[in-house]
Amino acid sequence: MFKNYVKIASRNLWKFKLYSFINIGGLAIGLAACMMMLLYVSHERNYNDFVANANNKFLLATENNFNGEIMRHRYMSYASGPMLKEKSPLVLNYARLQTPYQPVVVRANNIAGDAFTEKNIVFADPNFFQFFSYPLITGNAVAALDRPYTAVISRATAQKYFGQENPIGKVLVYDNNYKFEITGVAENAPSNTTVPFAMVLSLSSKLTMGEEGKYLSSGQQFIGGGGFSTYYELKPGTDLNKFAASIPSMNGEERRKASNDEFFFTSLNNIHLDKKLGDGNLKYLNIISLVVVLVLLLALINYMSLATARATLRAKEVGVRKAIGAGRIKIAYQFFTESGLYAVIAFMVGIAIFYVFQANFFGILGVHIDAQYLFTLRMAGLYVGLLLITIIIAGSYPAFILSAFKPVATLYGTISKSAGGSTVRKVFTVLQFSISVALIICGVIVHQQIQHFQNVHTGVDRNNVLMINFKSTIHPHYAAFNNEVQQLAGVKQTATAQYPMYEGFDMFFIRPKSDGKGNDNESTALPYFSVDSSFISLLGLQWSIAPGDYQELIHAKNTLVINEKAIEKLGLRQNPVNETINFAGATMRIGGVLKNFNYETLENAIGPMAIGITENAMNAWGERGGSMFVKIAPGTSIKPLMERLETIYKKYDAQSPFQYMFLDETFNKLFINETRLASLFDIFISITIMLACLGLFGLAAFMTEQRTKEIGIRKVLGSSVQQIIKLLSLDFIKLVFIAVIIAAPIGYFAMHQWLENFAYHVDIQWWVFVLSGLGAVTVAFITVGYQSLKAATRNPIKALKQD
């Protein structure tokens, strides 16, 4: 029986090629889109799932309340790991990690030609590979990092530096200063890890590396904030909140008095999507998850709508089967099998589409997903589940409609129009276009918001500003380096800062002096920038209260400037110049006030900040490197200038790569998630409109086919082509107008909620809804109009002769 059902379904598939193409094509496109998005969602929601006992492994972090501002900090002191294990039996194991705050130059065997700038460098405890379940290809996982200045590199890194040679025993030179012996090669880190690595260096090396090594070797023993991500494996069933609350009592009395740390544990499985601790974005992931459902729904609606529309063509077949004894269940099973065949074919076509376009899709998202992740049991289960859901939903409704036909009515040809579910098909059409129009509205507003980000005045002149990162090697020669750069044609001005703009700053605790304006017991954490005397003018920062003598300001000791927001936050008087504040334990004088400007993501309102200005900022932090800002004259040819800048850079640091970035591009990275969301909306909108139009095209083709004789009679009686097009199109256009009315408030509410996340956002304009609605109506008219025009221009004699 089943074989017979499949044979009949196959015949119908070939007999009605257009409708089969629309059904299978629509389902295939929808399923391919769902597969891509399911893969991404699964990948994002299952970070670190490869780690053994991941449910019992946690990152320790702190939360602090500074004058009403809650701050989370994920980095612990060097001693936090061993101290907590020693003091609590709940701790089974720990692992400390540290990554350099900026990319580091690494070379093989001290050969200048083999230098690379590495981002994913990790300093780690010896048990790193066991704790995070990273397998080693060669080397001993237990002993590979048990000595200072040893390193384990990934398979890809080994290939990059040494090709086919065995890297064991060879040397990597870190930051042109420190030599690390390679003691192992590990498999490449999975793409769904919160601890990616190109190379892992022994953490004990840190004790003898520069100023930080001196500090770590001083032996300060406390559990609290520092520079190391510290992970713990805890006993199963540990009460995390109770244990975290007990941690402050494990510190000495002096530390307990000085710190207001509140500790908390975050599961290894949840770190990635934690807004403050991870790199993922749960909000946008939920949006994508919702779109998976909507796209699948649209594809299924297409199929069910067209399948039930053509129900009347199968009515006599159903009548005959029932007349010779077939029950409703058998009839339903037959059509369910037919829908299943269509779904399986569409699924196979969808897999082909998925493999062709998945690299482009993930490129837009800016993510890399390991090829092997595609073939995990989890993904296989999700895709099989997707197929089963498609078969069940796509098959159930048509089978229910078709099996309900009464045999007498079908055999005598008296079946009503409503028997084919025409009302439901209208609802389906409205639902399809409601989703499409709502997504169009959302997409337009998301693009508007990104344009607003790009054009909003942030108080910083970002035009034609180049930032060049330099290493500590240049520090002794910076004056000469800076002078040569200033002499280049096309360079208007240079400045120096400790960090590139929008990529970093220090945090210090500031407390107003007791003068009745502030509270001695309340500290405020303020971002702090250390810059040279040209920084403010180069970036076009404006003074709210200018210093009386700028030269005096930059030469004065223990003096800084603040912004207007800091006056408000610290409770200072309106003109705080010459007031003193407690700045990280030192008394500092306020020398001037800058107008507010954005120095971080536009998702947040401008916050308080402080700037330390010195004539030669390099003396303060130059040994750690820094960032040179170069203001380029308008009209300057960029490529030749870059070549000249690189030549000068290499003159003073031949071993480090020349790294630069433009300030406006760095600024645009602040809203990269929103830019990707806009690109996703473009894809979603294209898919939903394509699916909606496919469905509308199929329904219009069927309806014109059913009304062929009516159209022929109307033409014989004198109806014009325009009248017939209007007759055939009007019902569909009405449905699209209803969809626009439904979609408008949905789109408005969704975008209003989304825009509330940003301190700076566009206002929702009425024309967005009008334009989106007109766009949908135009596309629908073109789709239906094509079929209507074909029917209206057909020879009426042929139409009347048609059986």
Image (spheres, grey):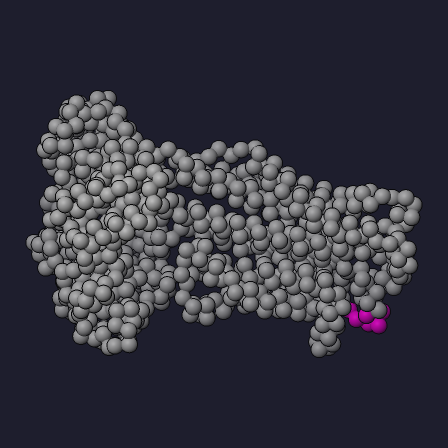
Task: Specify whether 707 is left or right of 683.
Answer: right
Q: Is residue 262 above or below residue 30?
A: above
Task: Specify whether 557 is left or right of 731.
Answer: left
Residue range (magenta): 321-327
Q: Quadrant of residue 311?
A: bottom right
Residue 325 on the magenta segment: yes
Measuring 81% from the left and 52% from the top, which residue is drawn there? Answer: 791
Could you tell me if residue 784 is visible in this image?
A: yes
Residue 393 on the magenta segment: no
Measuring 60% from the left and 47% from the top, which residue is drawn there? Answer: 436
**Residue 50 x %, y %:** 36, 67
**Residue 695 x %, y %:** 68, 54
Task: Specify whether 378 is left or right of 400.
Answer: left
**Residue 42 x %, y %:** 45, 60
Nearer to us in this view, 299 or 473: 473
**Quadrant placement of the C terminus:** bottom right
**Residue 315 x %, y %:** 81, 63
Nearer to us in this view, 598 or 494: 494
